[in-house]
Image: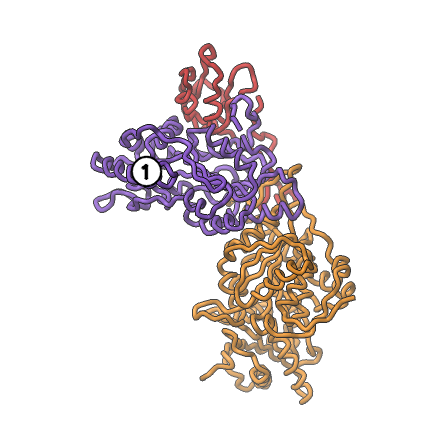
Chain colours: A red, B purple, C orange
Amino acid sequence: MSKPKVNSSFKPPSGYNEMFFGASNGVGILPTVNSGFRTFHPEFDYERCIKCMFCWIYCPEGCIDKTGKELTIDMDYCKGCGICAHECPRKCIAMVKDGGLDE
Amino acid sequence: MAINYKSLDDIELLYGAKTCQGCGAIMAARMTMKILGEKTCLATPACCFAATTTVYPQSAIFVNNAVTAFPGLAATISGMAVAKEALGWDEDITILGIAGDGGTIDIGLQGLSGAAERNDDIIYLCYDNEAYMNTGVQRSASTPYKTRTTTTPVGMCSMGEKNEIRKSLFEIMVAHRIPYAATASTSYPKDFMEKVAKAKAIKGCKVLHIMAPCPTGWGYDPALTVEIGKMAVELGLWYLAEYEDGKLKLNFIPKEFKPVDGYLKAQKRYSHLSEKDYAEITEIRDNEWVRLRKMFGLD
Amino acid sequence: MSEKAFISANEAAAHGVRLAKPHVVSAYPITPQTTLVEKLADFLAEGKADYKYMMVESEHSAMASALGASMMGARAFTASSSQGLLYMCEMLSYVSGARHPIVMVDANRSTATPWNIYGDHRDALSMRDSGWIMLFVENGQEALDTVIQAYRIAEDPEVMTPVMVNLDGFTLTHTYDMVDIPNQSTVDEYLPGFTTTNKFDLKDPKTLCQTVGPDYHAECRYLQQKAFEAAKQKIEEADREYGSIVGRHYNGMVEEYRCDDADVVLVTMGSVTGTARVVADLLRQNGKKAGLIKIRSYRPFPKEYFAGIKDRFKAIGVVDRSISFGFEGTVFSEVKSCLYGSNTKLANYIVGLGGRDVTKTVISEMYLKLFDLMQGKNGGEEIQFLGMRWE
């Protein structure tokens, strides 16, 4: 997975000597996941997928990973908007209700 | 530059933002960063993009970035561009500003006009969701006619936005004769990303105005963001164009404009409209295209 | 070798800016600051400087572009006055909270309405809570020297707070005086190049000017206050060192003039100080024990100094070139609060509003009222408008 991870090692400052300077911060710090946004999540039918990458470019979150043999989804940051399923020209993405997924 | 999705970078420079499901703004910003890459310093004023990416301790932006005052984006990135030169930073670094329609065409217009006149070396991306979405869907100068927003509500005495004419950021920038201006849509990613690549290669003030549909503010199922955006272009309610080397060019002219009601019926912000309104909006659209065709030298 | 020149305080301040070698100057004209930014443009045209000169389209953009430049790690400068200062006031707070060490000159001028281009302190004092260090200068020489010192103070790692150098509009900005202009190598010895980690860096990317909610906001403000506490010493040090390298100093935050055995003193800020010195001298020649306290650093306020003079003088008059409507002169309020519990008689003299000249006559009147107060006679009300047309 090439996607950024939730920053589980992020520790808030515990004193003035650990406070950020001014109004600054580092970049790319994700203290929480976005999976709580969704009710449905996408599931691929890899038999039908032709790797046109429409889902990959249209995903607002950028949580579809194209580095592997098949396209995979970062379930920490998928919000379940359904754009990928709607735009797939081969209709090979189904939006399946969450539940039974480990948080 | 031909855009090939498979060869675009896997690295996400915007990730984990707390935007709504199906947000057009973050979609536009992500496509932009795919082309500009990590050698980018970006600034953003008060807008959805800032409020969803940069609230301590979160930073959903993976390059140097700053939040700036609402009217001040263009001046801030101008200062960044000038300092970049003064300090001898690599020419290859892009100074990028990302703002919404309110922060650009209303309160930010003076600053942008100044930056355009000075021709500072910046890329200014305005994502247009047709209202002040961050503060709860109030109308902006970019809100289309008869749209319901919280400051143009619908009632016995009001049918929503009164103004038939939307302030045209594109035409204003053309009047400034900047090196490059373009309109785009998140539903046409190749067209948009080619425009970003073109802007990156030009020195001077480049302004990109992208339509970014907003499920929350417009009232539609988040899965339809790309479809709604496509409809807007196909119906002639948004055009894809460029201004380059002093010449205007329309990138896409639909052979015929479909009726507007499909687009309007799909969004709750237009639920108060009836056939009479669709006809009126169609006529306004058609008249606008007579003017646009002249402007682009098609007639 | 330094050179002497017969120049206005605006031009002197411009020399100070040139010698401080900023990377970016954002210029938008407003009376009475205009000749300052014009001089900065002249330097460029004559090849005497190489800063980038941004011709912004408003004061708000002047400060926003200075912020942008500072975020990239550049030393930035801008200048404004009155309406322009108020127009950029949102950006003042932006810059100070994010701790960017920008230096600006404010040519003090009244704020409309009524529309007035002449000098008083209404503009700067209305910005006293903006989080900027505020220094007030007495003359052109001090303007030049203080602009250079301002960068030294602002960029100190324990301070990292922007500095506003205040020059009285027209009284200083447009009057001429002999000014000693140090040479570049002397100033380079005093003021090193600007280095900071509070900036963008491709190898160490940052988020700057971020949003901070109720969970950490108060701590940010606490640290700003701490920086102002540290600034008190840094202002003293910067001034002392300037004295030893360049040869002139201004006593840091506060200067006493003939106060050692004074019975009554006036507290002044800005160009009025110069006139008051002359009057104090005249009174002394006539055997009257008059003294003068000059506030140079208004923010941070010299609280410790004023608490220390609690019962030293019999009467203190504070000169204010503005009034906080519904209450009293701002500087008076602050001096009075430091003297809480003191038996010293206090008076507030509101003068010089909208550019009305503060004459030796008016200042003598102040001293005479203070002597009356000292003797238990009627010195007038606590707050008095002086130099007025009618009673």
The answer to whether C320 appears left or right of C253 in the picture is: left
x, y percent for residue B158: 24, 45
The answer to whether B130 appears left or right of B37 in the picture is: left
Report the residue at 43% width, 31% height from top: B186
Residue A79 visible (yes or no): yes
Report the residue at 52% width, 23% height from top: B4
x, y percent for residue A72: 51, 18
Q: Examine the image and state in which quarter residue B219 appears.
A: top left
In this view, C296 is above or below A50: below
Q: Amino acid type of disc 1? A: Trp
User: Label 1: how many residues lie within 10 Å, few (<14), some (14-19) or many (20+)?
Assistant: some
Viewer-nearest residue: C299 or B271? B271
Chain label for disc 1: B
Viewer-nearest residue: B181 or C12? B181
The answer to whether A52 appears left or right of C106 in the picture is: left
Q: Examine the image and state in which quarter residue C108 appears.
A: bottom right
Query: Of helix, strand and loop, which one carries label 1?
Result: helix
Question: To which residue does mark 1 refer?
Answer: B289
Q: Quadrant of the C terminus of chain B?
A: top left
In this view, C148 is above or below B147: below
x, y percent for residue B70: 47, 48
Q: Examine the image and state in which quarter residue A40 appears.
A: top left
